[in-house]
Image (cartoon, rainbow, N blue to C red):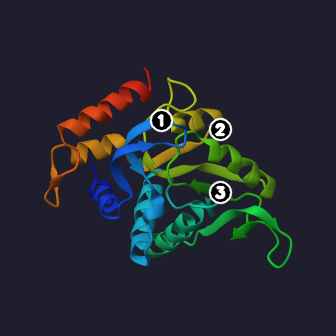
Amino acid sequence: MEAYKQEFIEFMIDCNVLRFGDFVTKSGRKTPFFVNTGFYRSGSQLKRLGEYYAKAISDAFGTDFDVLFGPAYKGIPLSVATSIAIAGEYGKEIRYCSNRKEIKDHGDTGILLGGPINDGDKVVIIEDVTTAGTSIRETLPILQAAGKVDVLGLVVSVDRMEQGQTETKSALQEIEESFGLKTTAIVTMADVVEHLYNKPYKGQVIIDDAMKARIDQYYEQYGVKA
């Protein structure tokens, strides 16, 4: 596993973004782990987060694209922080763009904020965590209405690696097949388990045998079936 992925896992723990315990996902699944990107709350945290996203995007898509689109609301700071990081780390000016939940009818009118979307633009979509693919289904029509664009793909922070709308494919796999988009994540839950299982971090074993058994049980129920 690349060093930046290991660092990102530890970064999520330090920011209280990645937690283990008893949680319920938006889809109603009881899960022993939870990722809440709303806990990135400081300037230094957003700076580092943008750098991790920038690295993942560069690895998967390169930097030959025009717009980084972050769906409202959590995608807005992600697109801003990551476009700044791409400029700083790779010297490439990428426009950030996001949508509004309500159309603005005065001043900077319309449904989009940030950089404009033009015909021929290459676009990468950035999100926090995708479990059902609902957001991408809402986002693509917005992009297509804005111009004749080439959507290269989607990047998320963590791939939960669980069933999407069917038992045989994950949400990211369904997005790839349904929309012809490449998808990538900074890390997968397999990466998280590999890095943390029975390995102390700051004096604490975060995934011990008991937690590993709970994670395994969760994937027996909600993991992708071959």
For label 2, the residue is 179
Residue lying at 36% horizontally and 54% vertically, measured from the top left: 18
For label 1, the residue is 29
Between discs 1 and 3, the one toward the N terminus: 1
| Residue at the outermost top position | 226
| On screen, residue 145 above or below 86 | above
Amino acid type, label 2: Phe
Q: Residues within 10 Å of mark 3 (few under 14, many from 20)?
A: some
Residue 12: horizontal and vertical position, in percent?
35, 59
Amino acid type, label 3: Lys
Relative placement, left or right, of 23 versus 61 is: left
Q: Residues within 10 Å of mark 1 (few under 14, many from 20)?
A: few
Residue lying at 62% horizontally and 61% vertically, measured from the top left: 73
For the residue labelled by badge 1, is the local secondary structure a helix, a strand or a loop?
Answer: loop
CB atoms at circles 2 and 1 under 8 Å apart? no
For the residue labelled by badge 2, is the local secondary structure a helix, a strand or a loop?
Answer: helix
Residue 181: horizontal and vertical position, in percent?
60, 42
- Numbered badge on residue 122: 3
| On screen, residue 164 above or below 32 | above
Q: Specify the quadrant that holds the C terminus.
A: top left
Amino acid type, label 1: Arg
Q: CA distance from mark 2 to mark 3?
A: 15 Å
Residue 66: horizontal and vertical position, in percent?
63, 63
Relative placement, left or right, of 206 versus 220 is: left
Mark in front: 1 vs 3: 1
Q: CA distance from mark 2 to mark 1?
A: 26 Å
